[in-house]
């Protein structure tokens, strides 16, 4: 619920308060530092240890700010900005409680920053949003059963959206190959006892987080 409220804000870079919690929560407009400060404030009010940190890509591009939060004794990287502007079932949660590879590899923390502060390491995905919701695909063997279960659930609800997170980029490519054609999708799901009869679907990916989202709808 906290995340849904926060990431529903609109991305902006020039508003007066876009780098503050006021901009994120009151005006509904924020950029990464405003989102990070807001998430830190909210989590600290809940008694959760949370830091705001920043890094910059090696190619000299724009820097980025995100959070490190301690959940059940383990530190994770948390980047609500990745879903900024999304709402409801459009939320992908690709960088919620993840390890260092999904954020720090893209935005390395500078040596100057590290010389002044002790930044906890983040090397676990066990507390990520998708791991906790059983929508993280660790191996090829997991992919079919997880997809079949998610498709079955939204079909029973007469349509809806769901997202899964794949451990490796190669799995995203394979899913794109299978689900790029209706026949491939139908054949794949049929192996797990799921029928798409009467329904259509479309999908999108968030390549930088290996998240694959499906929206299933009643085909009129």
Image (tube, rainbow, N blue to C red):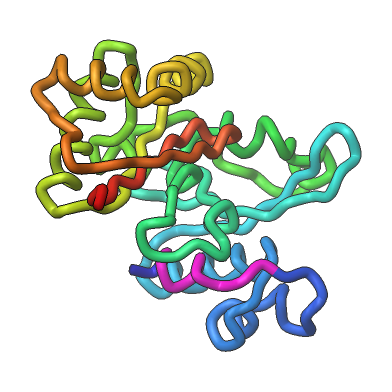
**Relative image position of residue 26 (x, y in whole percent):** 56, 87
- In the rendered structure, the answer to whether residue 75 lies left or right of residue 84 reads left
Position above or below: 60 against 22: above
**In the rendered structure, does residue 5 fall within the stretch colored magenta?**
yes
- In the rendered structure, the answer to whether residue 15 lies left or right of residue 123 reads right
**In the rendered structure, does residue 177 fall within the stretch colored magenta?**
no
State the count of labels: 0
Q: Residue at x 66, y 72 (%)?
A: 30
Where does the magenta region start and end? 3-11
Position of the N terminus by quadrant: bottom left
Q: Residue at x 16, y 53 (%)?
A: 158
The answer to which image quadrant residue 58 occupies is top right
Closest to the observer: 161 or 75?
A: 161
Closest to the observer: 1 or 169?
A: 169
Q: Residue at x 51, y 65 (%)?
A: 7
**Relative image position of residue 190 (x, y in whole percent):** 16, 20
Position above or below: 209 against 12: above
């Amino acid at each position: 619920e906290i995340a849904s409220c926060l990431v529903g804000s609109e991305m902006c870079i020039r508003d007066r308060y876009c780098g503050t919690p006021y901009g994120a929560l009151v005006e509904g407009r924020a950029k990464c530092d405003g989102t990070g400060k807001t998430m830190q404030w909210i989590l600290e009010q809940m008694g959760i240890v949370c830091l705001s940190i920043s890094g910059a890509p090696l190619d000299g591009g724009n820097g980025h700010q995100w959070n490190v939060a301690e959940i059940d004794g383990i530190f994770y990287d948390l980047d609500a900005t990745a879903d900024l502007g999304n709402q409801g079932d459009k939320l992908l949660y690709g960088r919620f409680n993840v390890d260092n590879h999904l954020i720090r590899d893209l935005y390395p923390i500078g040596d100057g920053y590290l010389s002044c502060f002790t930044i906890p390491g983040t090397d676990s995905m066990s507390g990520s949003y998708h791991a906790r919701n059983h929508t993280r695909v660790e191996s090829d063997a997991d992919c079919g059963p997880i997809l079949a279960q998610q498709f079955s659930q939204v079909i029973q609800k007469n349509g809806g959206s769901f997202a899964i997170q794949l451990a490796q980029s190669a799995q995203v490519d394979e899913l794109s190959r299978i689900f790029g054609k209706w026949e491939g999708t139908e054949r794949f799901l049929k192996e797990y006892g799921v029928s798409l009869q009467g329904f259509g679907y479309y999908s999108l990916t968030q390549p930088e987080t290996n998240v694959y989202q499906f929206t299933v709808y009643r085909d009129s």
